[in-house]
Image (tube, grey):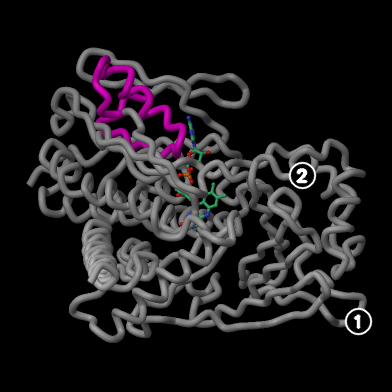
Amino acid sequence: MNHSYKKNVVIIGGGPAGLGAALMLAKRGWKDITVIEKRPSADYYEPDKSFSYQIDGRGQKLTDLLELTPKLADLSVPNTDFYFTLIQKDGTRKTTKLPIVDSKRKTAYWLPRASFVELLYQEILQHWQDSIQVLFNIECVEIKQSLEHLEIITQSQLQEKLTFVPNLIVGCDGLNSIVRQTLHQMEGQSHFFEMQKFPSPSSGLKYKVLTLPPQFPLSEKEGDVAKSTMAYAIRSAFKGRKKAISLGLLPLKNQKIPRSANIITYPDHQIWQLETKEEVEEFLKQAFPQLPLEKIISPEEIARFTSSEGGKFPIPQYCSGLYKIWGNPENGQGTAVILLGDAVHCFPPDIGQGVNSALEDIYVFQEILAETNDNLSQALPRYQNLRQSDIKALIRLAQISYPWQYNQDLVQKRLWSLNFFLRLLLNRLLPFIFNPHSFLLIQNHELSYSEILAKSNSTTQILLSLGGLAILILIWNFLT
Ligand SMILES: Cc1cc2nc3c(=O)[nH]c(=O)nc-3n(C[C@H](O)[C@H](O)[C@H](O)COP(=O)(O)OP(=O)(O)OC[C@H]3O[C@@H](n4cnc5c(N)ncnc54)[C@H](O)[C@@H]3O)c2cc1C
């Protein structure tokens, strides 16, 4: 078998999908893989991107393949040890252990995004430097067609330009992917590479992150400090949709790194209208009288928070086109392009599947490369056929599974809880008829997203039919 074609790859984007894809290809024997990343380093700290990932069984299909799961476990808090403390405005606290609903499920691991990306990067440095080079501080600024090839033009911070003519381009450059946008422009009238958007009650919510010291004090009492491995929800003294806020902290294994407190709320919330650091400081002091804020948040951090743009949860979206091929990339006379991760499916973090679905994309691509002996002209159409329906189902699941968890609307949140527990109860009583809520089914990595959506829809149909029947019986009884 001639494997000379398994080389000359450019991956745009060195996030979880980009570095994961580079490692997968190197493990399959591909050489000459270049990752282009515009950030300065793998563990570059961006306060407003300092969220935590929960790598579940789905994401672990890839970390198992790369033999990285034990190292991942070492860096993380397992969900089996997930403790959560709710701190009320008067300082009262209640700690609960997150219930593990399905004990047969694989342990999931919580760790900060930067730690996960650094884990993948260190694996490249330690074992794959002969196949993979990662170029930081370099941005892909243009992709041009030249006969049967595509040319990638990059620019460094010093304005130096570099051009690549790869056989395989892997677009792992996130939501605003230049790779996908270029394919969309090249397709002309077709909408194949255009993102299709679907509404969700959590999209558009604004978030910012407050960075707190590792073991910050919870009160004036000596030794009363936050535990790194503990998750916290700290409620404010304010009431009302435009004033009440909450600080949300996820667990962290490393006791030396700062904690990220997420503030997630409507874009017209009062906190986003504050313009000076003095106004923000006063707002936080009044909001959280239970915390010794002056010991927790430095004036510099308040200034950074005030001037930060923050971010907005994206609208659930996907594009149907996952690949395109020019010429014959197997003979080195053409370019194949594949899109993975947020570049083709993106949604708010409600279901914790952003990174897991990206890692599963890579795992599925790997399985198809194995079936086709790495022949891209066969593998890419097969990948698209197989993955397209799952991506579509994933976006629907992102819309319906748990969009009300950010306390946007208490009535909707209660209705969601009612629906969740009704399905759980019915499933326990009659498992062959009723499925649990999709939010629970997603945790089962052995089910594809399409299977999960089908199960969820079938239970919805039965519940609607039973509801309709109950209404008919009531009307009948009323009339007779
Ligand atoms: C607030 C928030 C919270 C989230 N929480 C979770 C969560 O709890 N769990 C979860 O699973 N997911 C979460 N996500 C989603 C998750 O971050 C993404 O799904 C995941 O990062 C996708 O990985 P990716 O590699 O495809 O894209 P990204 O992580 O976006 O990586 C893309 C990379 O490409 C680089 N890049 C982009 N354009 C270029 C270019 N032109 N040239 C060079 N480099 C480029 C970027 O710098 C970046 O490093 C969250 C997202 C947000 C916004």
The image quadrant that residue 171 belongs to is top left
How many numbered discs, if any?
2
Q: Position of residue 427 (x, y in %)?
A: 29, 79
Q: Position of residue 59 (x, y in %)?
A: 37, 62
The image quadrant that residue 351 belongs to is bottom left
166 drawn magenta: yes
Is residue 455 shown to the viewer in this render?
A: no
On-image quarter of the C terminus: bottom left
Q: Residue at x 51, y 54 (%)?
A: 117
Q: Residue furthest left?
A: 1
300 drawn magenta: no
* Residue 49 shown left or right of residue 379 in the figure: right
Q: Secondary structure at mark 1?
A: loop
- The residue that label 1 is drawn on is 222
In the image, what residue type sits under mark 1? Answer: Glu
* Residue 383 shown left or right of residue 170 in the figure: left
Q: Nearer the viewer, residue 167 or 429?
A: 429
Q: Residue at x 34, y 39 (%)?
A: 318
* Residue 204 shown left or right of residue 165 in the figure: right
Q: Nearer the viewer, residue 314 or 478?
A: 478
**Residue 198 vertical position relative to residue 102 in the rendered view, above or below:** above
Q: Do the numbered discs 1 and 2 sit on residues whose CB atoms are within 8 Å?
A: no
